[in-house]
Image (cartoon, rainbow, N blue to C red):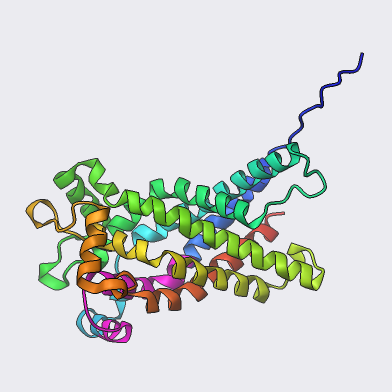
Amino acid sequence: MQSDTKEIKSLPMDYRENAKDLAAGAAGGVAQVLIGQPFDIVKVRLQTQFGGSALTAARNIYAQEGARSFYKGTLVPLLGVGACVSIQFGAFHGFRQLIESYNYRNGHTKDPGLSLPQFYLAGGAAGVTNSLISGPVEHIRIRLQTQPHGDAQLYSGPWDCARKIIRLEGPAGLYRGQVVTLLREFHGYGVWFAAYEGLLGFLQHHEQKKREELPNWQIAICGGLAGEALWLLSHPLDVIKSKMQSDGFGPNQKYHNMRHAFKETWVTGGIRGLFQGLGPALLRAMPVSAGTFATVELVRKLLV
């Protein structure tokens, strides 16, 4: 006897695609660091040391610390960001599949694809997953980027920095500013993935092409514009994160929590204080995000 109950179906999880996204994300993360690190150190200096312009900060770094200093603290992000971007893309694909399966079960069998809000949700969830690694990685990177130069140098390298943080505040000290990091990662990567997928969808519809048929330069432009959207809409959270993660320890600690950091930044700098360093962040976003997505899509095509 046939059951009247409608059979609940779901789309199968594609683990091969997940593996491809992890590998492609790792390659994209390496490209992201190599392209973006010089811009990033200027941004962090502006966020944590008041006054001046991006050009002045870049000139000062070059004059006082040399050209190699634009890649100060690169080892940790090179390893860590490769892992982070790998996790971002792998997690994004996993959450995307879960939402597609949800759409399929709820009757969207013709097109179980994601809407823009759903892309935002999948990207935000991927960002939260990634924050478990990105929090400590960025904390160490920021301390290396903002420490004094020469004899006054505080840390000999990333491992020395991590050891000293743990000695002063315990393992939890590596996660300083984690609440604002979670907020930035959820919102920022929600915007990033939604903008990218939305732009790609527009191009596919406009040119009547499949995703894999789009030329690399169009992929790069979509990725670059998505990067601009990410930083425009999440920069104040990044400023607060940088301030908290470059703050002192013990009696030298200026910010007690995220709310206190927001309040102090508003009192001293107003709305402009929350957007300090936006210029180099936007300059960095276009090539870095373009390079990341172009590399990811290229590697995914190669991993057939």
Which of 211 and 300 lies nearest the eye of the viewer? Answer: 211
Residue in the picture at 68% in, 66% down: 200
Q: Does the magenta stretch include residue 43?
A: yes
Is residue 231 rendered to the left or right of residue 122? left
Where residue 301 sits: x, y (%)? 69, 60
Where residue 70 sits: x, y (%)? 32, 75
Q: Can you name the residue that lies furthest to the left here?
A: 251
Where residue 298 sits: x, y (%)? 65, 64
Vertical placement of residue 103 versus 60, above or below: above
Q: Tell me if I can see residue 50 in this picture.
A: yes
User: In the picture, residue 238 is in which quadrant?
Assistant: bottom left
Q: Tell me if I can see residue 134 in this picture.
A: no
User: In the picture, residue 108 is in which quadrant?
Assistant: top right
Is residue 143 rendered to the left or right of residue 96? left
Is residue 177 rendered to the left or right of residue 164? right
Q: How many marks?
A: 0
Vertical placement of residue 236 versus 184, above or below: below
* The N terminus: image quadrant: top right
Q: Is residue 42 magenta?
A: yes
Residue in the picture at 20% in, 60% down: 156
Magenta segment: 32-59
